[in-house]
Amino acid sequence: MRICVIGTGYVGLVVGTCFAESGNNVVCVDIDEAKIEGLKNGVIPIYEPGLKELILKNAGEGRLSFTTDLAFAVKSSLLQFIAVGTPPGEDGSADLNHVLGVAREIGRHMDSFKIVVDKSTVPVGTADKVRTAIRQELDARKVDIEFDVVSNPEFLKEGAAIDDFTRPDRVVIGVDDVRTAEIMKELYAPFVRKSNRIIVMDVRSAEMTKYAANAMLAVKISFMNQMANLCELLGADVAAVREGIGSDSRIGYDFLFPGVGYGGSCFPKDVKALVRTSAESGYDFVMLKAVEEVNERQKQVLSGKIISYFGGDGKARPLEGRRIAVWGLSFKPRTDDMREAPSIVIINTLLEAGARVSAHDPVAVKEAKKVFGDRITYASNEYEILKDADALAIVTEWNEYRNPDFERIAELLKRPVIFDGRNLYEPRRMKYLGFDYFAIGRNGKQFTSERG
């Protein structure tokens, strides 16, 4: 099939590349000339494992191309995937200006039957607005061209997006026309061996499904973070509790890892948007409001432990003269995405408390510099920042941090103390190794070594 993907951000590049990999002819469109020129020359604007190799392969074999010429792309393609950003407004509502702007452009340039697919995460009712925007442009041109609008939400995890797209646990297609439904099912057939993984429903239900899925996962994370905090107070171990409840097939183990809160481009934005949509409908979604509040509080837990450890109660700048080494900046491993990353809140809190911060991340340093600038220092090696640091704080659970050289860490730090925001290590082992070790919800009181 001939496919146009409008928007070369995270979703657009993954979608376009994977469709090309399955044999389709795909053209990706963006108004950013520098980005398009870079893509033509093999410069990939985001980090996602395996994506660069697939882009270079499919571009080299002629199935994947990049352009700023939207008119050409629309006219030459049956399927128009809208994959532009929907940033949250100050009130939490999704900004649809880019989506509706693309819809109008499609209406201005289409010259035959088109299937317009909302791939961006959009509120319920957006497909109707897209349909209206296209129809208004056609009316202005005084032409009557048939088209259909589909909701096809993405369920991609950053760091595993290629696998998620090519081996999906489900594909949701919101559609009103049987013919269009069959075309969409044919498009996804190479990725779905079991027919029950393609779920066809009405458009509004498909739009809601994306928000509902992310909201449910955010609820699980926030619930587990509060359970971890309660475990500390009551002397329970959240790791044992997780094992006990995760074995219940109705609950499962996924997204039951306590930590420093969720971040990224999906959960924070989608929870806010669903709360806003609920309010506009006259419904007070109390649980999701609480999830937001829990998540924001959780981002302060790790920095609170650090300030408390160094005796900062009542001091204006309790960490004055201290240097904290931070491992991990991106909101999660296997991505360079810093959007809503817990590290931003944690590091800013440490800086406000007077600390100097040195940080390491395998891939996110470039993006982190856009956030922190020169307010912190960066290193290309995780051990480099430990020398003479007062403590190590682990914020992102990169594999590189899971089995480090603890003897080397202890030698480099002024004192062997680790604040683990991702519960990477076993507390009893850390005590045996002589560390003061502070995790999230592990065995109530934290493990402190016998060293002075």
Image: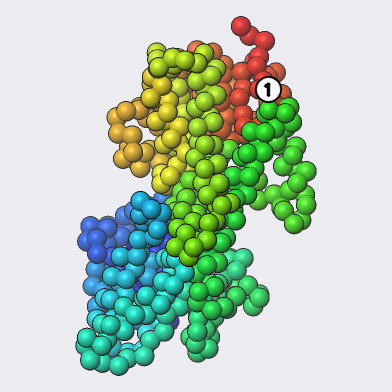
Looking at the rendered structure, the kind of residue marked 1 is Lys
Look at the image and tell me whether residue 219 can be seen. yes
Dot 1, crowdedness within 10 Å: few (<14), some or many (≥20)?
some
Foreground of the two, 314 or 267: 314
Determine the residue positioned at 55% across, 24% down: 305
Q: Is 177 left, or right, of 339 in this rendering?
A: right
Residue 152 appears in the figure:
no
User: Which residue shows up at 50% across the image and 32% down it?
Assistant: 300
Q: Please give left or right for residue 216 compared with residue 234 in the image.
A: left
Q: Nearer the viewer, residue 2 or 238?
A: 238
Viewed as shown, does residue 23 lie left or right of 146?
Answer: right
Query: Closest to the observer: 425 or 253?
Result: 253
Q: Hey, which residue is sitting farthest top in the picture? A: 452
| Residue occupying image coordinates x 72% and y 42% | 242
User: Eyeballing the image, is 438 above or below 157?
Assistant: above
Label 1 sits on a secondary structure element that is loop
- Residue 251 in the image, given as x and y percentages of width and height: 72, 53
Q: Residue furthest front?
A: 282
Question: Where the N terminus falls, by quadrant?
Answer: bottom left
Q: Is residue 326 above or below residue 123?
A: above
User: Quadrant of residue 238 in the image?
Assistant: top right
**Position of the C terminus by quadrant:** top right
Residue 223, image quadrant? top right
Q: Residue at x 50, y 77 (%)?
A: 203
Q: How is the image coloured?
A: rainbow
Of 302 and 9, the residue lying toward us: 302
How far across and down, in percent of the image, does residue 421 sit? 56, 33
- Left or right? Give the position of 250 relative to 141: right
Instruction: Give the percent coordinates (x, y) of residue 330.
Output: 45, 41
Residue beneath label 1, please?
A: 445
Q: Picture coordinates of residue 438 (x, y %)?
A: 61, 24
